[in-house]
Amino acid sequence: MATAARRPRVRPVEPTGSGRGWKEQLRRISELSLLGVLAALACLPVLTAGAVVATLSRAVGHWADHDDLPPWSEVGREFVRRLLPGALVSVAGALAVVVFTLERHWLRSGAVPGGGAGLAVLWAVAAVLLAVVLLAVPRLADGPGRTWRAALALGWTALLRVPPAGAAAL
């Protein structure tokens, strides 16, 4: 009777992961890290940044849904498909950064009237636009036909519907 009471308890499996071993988790982390390094390298020519972001959104969306990255060939095809539309987004983003930088310089130097209030408005507008872009990026993964324009419209709608989401995205 006493031996039955001293039986070692089997610890239940914790619901914190996929139940895979540490080697599998390390492999998954390595894949995501490699994806990030390749994305950083692919963004070096600024024109590819929009395509890289859209491709990463789709790949990470697949990873979240299927617990694994899509095949590298599929990631490459997605990148090529998103290259031209992404170049337009990249140019628009680069122009926005240039305009913001010039406007900030002009307000600080006094070449444009407005001073501190103008700078505050400029930063607020930049924060709102950045929040819209950050809310739009996950929507690029919703479907293979999801365009930047549709994703930005959904990001804007999400910001208007739930303003704290924009603050969280920032």
Image: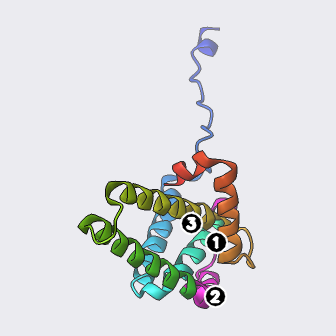
**The image quarter in which residue 83 lies:** bottom right
The amino acid at mark 2 is Arg
Q: Residue furthest top?
A: 1
Could you say whether the residue bearing mark 2 is in a helix, strand or loop? Answer: helix
Q: Residue furthest left?
A: 109
Alpha-carbon neighbours of circle 1 within 10 Å: few (<14), some, or many (≥20)?
A: many
Is residue 68 at all visible to an observer of this figure? no
Q: Does the image show residue 31?
A: yes
Q: Which residue is mark 2?
A: 77
Disc 3 is placed on an element classified as helix
- Circle 3 residue: 133
Badge 3 amino acid: Val
The answer to whether residue 147 is magenta is no
| Frontmost residue, 95 versus 136 | 95
104 up-or-down from 91: above or below:
above
User: Alpha-carbon distance for marks 1 and 2?
Assistant: 12 Å
Which region shows up in magenta? Answer: 63-86
Q: Which residue is mark 1?
A: 58
Side of 32 where 83 appears, left or right: right
Q: Measured from the top left, where is residue 155 in percent x and y?
A: 65, 62
At label 2, counting other C-alpha atoms closer than 10 Å, the crowd grade (few under 14, some 14-19, many 20 or more) is few
Name the element at disc 1.
helix
